[in-house]
Image (spheres, helix red, strand yellow):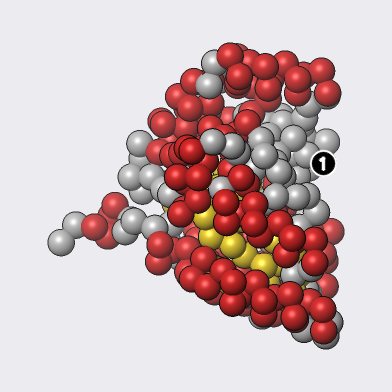
Amino acid sequence: MPLICVAAPKGGVGKTTLAANLAEALHRAGRCVLAIDFDPQNALRLHFGLPVRDGAGFVTELPRRPDWQGLVRHTACGVGLLPHGTNDIHAALRLNAALEREPELLLAPLRAMLADPALVVIADLPPGPSHPLHLLAPVADLVVAVLLADATSAALVPEIDSGRFLGTGTMAALHTGRVRVVLNQVDPQSRLSRAVAEALARHLGPRLLGAVCRDEAVAEALAAQHLLHELAPESAAALDIEEIAQGIAALLPVPAEAAAP
């Protein structure tokens, strides 16, 4: 039932890598997890070992009102996956126009997914303001904003504080309380990285879910099309992600099967 949106004010911050590995960590913690790729880069599938040439997906099919259950990929780690699908620029523009005209193309299947009380849905969203973020933020239990520990990301914190990160207007500001932040690629050997991370930790307080250190194992896992826990479970980044997943789990409703007395 819970919906977790993984987003970022800018690209290149490791958002998709974090979404994939959080999905796997929550599944290992006993949750039934469905990961959905809303990012046109269609890269979430690569973390779960799908072939590069496999361009089928869910989001690209939305104008045709697909049966989403029939498009779910059952991955080796146990996470259900709905890839974005391969799109060219013309198809992407048509998709955006269709969602503008008829938001129910997305919201109707999402409601069906969230009707399952045992299911956790993790949505990997495009970087920056986007139509999927605009539609999903009002129904999300949690929006995880990914930032780097650098000066550029520090400059973007006011976008999160004000709610502009979620769009414009009063409704966006109302959803700001659901936003939590993860700092990614924190370099303990870099004085600047440490200083930015410490400053952001002081500023964000309890809104900071955690930090993931810079770790070569992350790039190695992606190159091998493996999740980090599969390739390097004792790596520093894997342990950081495990801790963040535990923090997220504590914020979510109790799973349906565990709710009964």
Task: Kindly identify the residue that appears in the image at 31 percent across and 59 percent down.
Answer: 254
Please state the horizontal and vertical placement of residue 31, each as a whole percent of the image. 43, 57
Please state the horizontal and vertical placement of residue 33, each as a whole percent of the image. 49, 50
Residue that carries the numbered disc 1 in the rendered image: 52
Which of 237/135 is in front? 135
Task: Kindly identify the residue that appears in the image at 75 percent across and 81 percent down.
Answer: 194
Which of 146/68 is in front? 146
Task: Kindly identify the residue that appears in the image at 49 percent across and 71 percent down.
Answer: 206
Q: Is residue 33 visible?
A: no
Which of 242/72 is in front? 242
Image position of 41 with respect to 203: above or below: above
Which of 101/19 is in front? 101
Element at label 1: loop
Q: Quadrant of residue 199?
A: bottom right
Please state the horizontal and vertical placement of residue 115, each as a whole percent of the image. 35, 36
**Quadrant housing the C terminus:** bottom left
Residue furthest to the left: 261
Q: Quadrant of residue 111?
A: top left
